Image: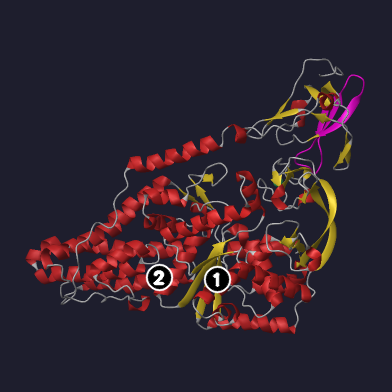
Amino acid sequence: MVNLGNRRYFRRLTERKTIMAKRTLITSALPYANGPIHLGHLAGAYLPADLYTRYLRLKGEDVIHICGSDEHGVPITIAAEKEGITPQQVVDKFHNQNKGIFERFGIDFDYYGRTSSKTHRETSQDFFKVLNEQGVFKKKTEEQLYDEDADMFLPDRYVKGTCPICGYAEAYGDQCEKCGSSLSPTELIDPISAITGNKPITKMTEHWYLPLGNFQEWLEEWIGSRKKWKPNVTGQCKSWLNTGLGDRAVTRDLTWGVPVPLPEAEGKVLYVWFDAPIGYISATKEWAEKQGNPDLWKTYWQDDDTTLIHFIGKDNIVFHCIMFPAILKQYGKYILPENVPANEFLNLEGRKLSTSKGWAVWLDEYMDNFEPDLLRYVLGTTLPETKDSDFTWKDFQVRVNSELADIFGNFVYRTTSFTQRFFDGQVPEAKDLNETDRAALSAITEQKELIQKAYDSFRFREAIAETMNLARIGNRYFTETEPWKSRKEAPQVCKNTLYVCSQICGALSLLFQPVMPQKMHLFREQLGIPHHTKWEQIDDHLVSAGHLVTEQEILFNKIEDDIVEKEIQKLKDKSETQTGEEEKFPALKETATFDDFMSLDLRAGKIVAAEKVKKSNKLIKIKVDLGFEKRTILSGVAEFFSPDDIVGKSVCVVANLAPKKMMGIESNGMILMGEDSEGSLHFVETDAEPGSPIT
Ligand SMILES: [Zn+2]
């Protein structure tokens, strides 16, 4: 795949990095329009993307931030079936809801599109057509699972079954959520349809595959050259590359989605992960249209002077670092992402976030009780940038109270109220600054440099910590210089202190702008600093003497204990109602007839010998005495019992089960076990003598 042309293309991409970006295109992962936004989403993509966008805007750079709803894929249709409404109704509801929530929270998108739009359908169909004409796709006819009653194929989450890797009984057709393996529906053991609960049949169907193996060499070279990528991102890419890239189906047998634009592909749509990233392009087209300059999108997607950055969570790395770049590269003309600063996962109160278990903080509920900027700050200091991190309500309270209120808020309050009281609100003139004054002043530019470096390397936690450090320096300086004493003893010394403190306040009102845009807007008004002030103007004399500082409310109020305790309790209550009976116990299977049951021959047996199966972590080879004969049965209990523990147990055996070969050994029957909600196994024991029927 790699030829001279590719190398040249690739070199051009690497070389241009040395020149400053003329413009930046920022994208945030498109959220599925099948549910509301929670803290995990925010910490993964949207807050970091917004911090970076606002930072670049503050620097006066040409930047646009593009996002939108991902309205295709099986999660949408399943949500629709669950609620008894159409997929269109589902996406309309959540598209509008999430768009509004992002706005309220101050996520600064230039455009929030949706993948059900006409532009998106045309754009993604064009990608498919061009790649198809280039002869890239492989067409394969293969057996797929099919639900006869529902009269449809069962891709992705439409089928559930036992994971062939870890044995988890509720694995989906595309992924096992227990062990994280990515699966295809036909790999599942004992698959059942998620629609009817039926056992599916297999049926032949034709699909288009993108042979990613053709891009392997090029991707290795390209990803290898991305020196600034985060190690967690390159690490995941390399593990995909090391396993070797295979063919990936880009079409599905579904009715909801972008129709495959070929006459012979009726009833087929594009795979959601083929069309979703193209959504960034179609949303940019719609944005350009709104600017009255329909071709403007090309400048952002096809001009080498544009830097493209994808903000995503770690579960989307393969699509943004392997699949989408391969598609863009193959199509030609398009630029490739300069960086994909993917975040790890955010936990909540020490537990994995789970929407189905109710273990999540929804953004709209948060905003009913607290201001957006508080969460932007706290979450910003806790972002899972290099490893998973944890959000707790206690930590939220501590950071709001002891950092925002006690350090930053206190410093601002001391400075502005002192200026009000003793200088009629006018920033005093500085004269003959001493060393302490000069050190405090120079902290502004020193901190600014540290903050800038951190933002430029996508280390937002560090950027925010260094910004707070400037407030800390200011607060300490105020205490040390004791203006309440010098006011009478040495008035000029007092004036110098307030002058210096005003400069630090001015700088903070801008340096904190990306993190707390709403609060800083108010703060700048209080300080009389114009809102269009840019990053390069942040220095040690931003606020001139004589400048009027007005009185304002306190910037940050403290949060009382009972308020956060209420939030913790709310979380616990909600997760308990949602992990009630149905979660603790699996749903009942369909009614079996008496004959179904009688067709099973259950017998009492006694375990007479047991040994671990070599090279298997799970299987024990068990010899069972059934009275009339001794049998070999393989049982997946090695994680719970050692062979010695189980010899002598009187057990129940399904004695007429068809033989099955595992790890080269034939198993003749099954020993009944009880599995509790923790996943532990218990033998079903009996006092009956070996061979006795169990009815
Ligand atoms: Zn698994």
Where is residue 3, by image quadrant? Answer: bottom right
What percent of the width, then of the height, locates residue 38? 50, 52
Colour option used: secondary structure
Q: What whole-number distance in Å separates the C-alpha atoms at marks 2 and 1?
A: 22 Å
346 is within the stretch colored magenta: no
Which span of residues is magenta-colored? 609-634
Q: Which mark is residue 431?
A: none
What percent of the width, then of the height, locates residue 684? 74, 24
Q: Residue at x 35, y 62 (%)?
A: 518
Q: Amino acid at mark 2?
A: Leu
Q: Residue at x 68, y 57 (%)?
A: 256
Q: Nearer the viewer, mark 2 or mark 1?
A: 1
What percent of the width, then of the height, locates residue 479? 21, 60
Determine whether 690 is above or below 512 in the image.
above
- Of residues 189 and 178, the one drawn nearer to the viewer in this rendering: 189
Neighbor class of circle 2 (other Cα within 10 Å; few <14, some 14-19, many 20+) is: some
- Of residues 102 and 171, the one drawn nearer to the viewer in this rendering: 102
Q: Which mark is residue 450?
A: 2
Looking at the rendered image, the quarter that the N terminus falls into is: bottom right
